Amino acid sequence: MKKWLSVFLVLLVALTSCMVCGCTETQAQTSDATPTPVVEENTNLMVYCGAGLREPMDVIAQKFTEKEGIDVKYTYGGSAQLLSQIELVKQGDAYMPGARSYIDSAIKKGFVDETENVVYHVMAIVVPKGNPANITTLEDLTNEKVRVAIGEPEGPAVGKAAKKMLEKDGLWEGVSDNTVVRSGTVNELLVYVSMNQADAAIIWADLYNPESMELIDIPVEEGFVKIVPVGTLSFSENKENAVKFMNFVASDEAKSVFREHGFDTNHEPKYEA
């Protein structure tokens, strides 16, 4: 009896071992058969762009996507606001503010590594249709009861440039006394003028809308001209595509789009005299 019991126990142990080995082998085979997930490269680009550049940049993004198969997603806003956002999140691929000074600040902070100059931003005065306050010069913005709209001096490029221009011409204090709004974006200034909530606004000339306002040119010697640049962000995870986008924005094809929207392209002799 003891002999048969011993034989039975030996067989049971052997059978259990075979079952364990079989399970282990099956699990190993199943694990080896599982395919490695394929991670597709993200080709989308995230670009921080000055609000005053929206119209031409939307067209340029479409042309770039058709040519390269790379989608472009913009974050529009004031140049200073966008720089603060870049500093906070440290994500994205390119930065296109309304003036070179913002790119220079981004370079000093280590956020931008490559840049190209693209077009000019030229300052001008816009007034409602009919020009009810009879504005013809910068000095007229200091006249009694004139309501002026300007960009926030510490915010968008247009505000910073307007203050610098008016200080240079000795008009800053007089215009400040007549200022009824300081806007965070240049596009908001257009709304105040078109709705007759301001008698005049200092904007970039390329944003002028002839259907709802009139344009007053500022002489070059009194005015202010800004070069609009574009740069790639140093922490871009799509650097090759970001460089392609930067080069395309600075290309002749893209500059023709800017000209169609009223911009002067880079290297205009009248601004370099």
Image: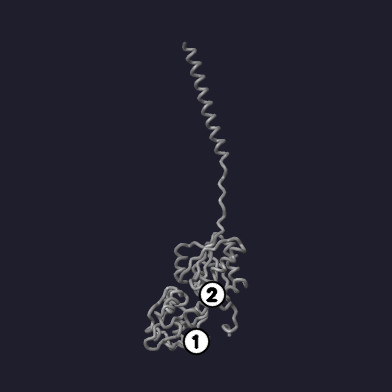
Quick one: label 2, few (<14), some, or many (20+) residues within 10 Å? many
Query: In this orientation, which residue lies closer to the viewer: 126 or 118?
Result: 126
In this picture, residue 68 sits left or right of residue 104 = right
Position of residue 8 relative to residue 115, above or below, is above
Q: Position of residue 8 (x, y in %)?
A: 49, 17
In this picture, residue 17 sits left or right of residue 180 = right
Q: Circle 2 is placed at which residue position?
A: 228
In this picture, residue 241 sits left or right of residue 170 = right
Q: Tell me how the rendering is colored.
A: one colour
In the image, what residue type sits under mark 1? Glu
Q: Position of residue 86 (x, y in %)?
A: 47, 65
Position of residue 71 relative to residue 175, above or below, is above
Position of residue 200 relative to residue 95, above or below, is below
Q: Give the residue at x 50% y 21%.
A: 12
Q: Which mark is residue 222?
A: 1
Quick one: label 1, few (<14), some, or many (20+) residues within 10 Å? few
**Callout 2 touching callout 1 (CB < 8 Å):** no
> Which of the 4 image quarters holds residue 182?
bottom left
Query: In this orientation, which residue lies closer to the viewer: 209 or 63?
Result: 209
| Secondary structure beneath label 2 | strand
Badge count: 2
Q: Which mark is residue 258?
A: none
Q: Earlier in the sequence, mark 2 or mark 1?
A: 1
- Quadrant assignment for the C terminus: bottom right
Query: In this orientation, which residue lies closer to the viewer: 65 or 273?
Result: 65
Position of residue 124 relative to residue 74, above or below, is below
Q: Position of residue 270 (x, y in %)?
A: 58, 84
In the image, what residue type sits under mark 2? Val
Q: Position of residue 237 (x, y in %)?
A: 54, 59
| Secondary structure beneath label 1 | loop
Real-space Cα separation, disc 2 to disc 1, in angstroms: 20 Å
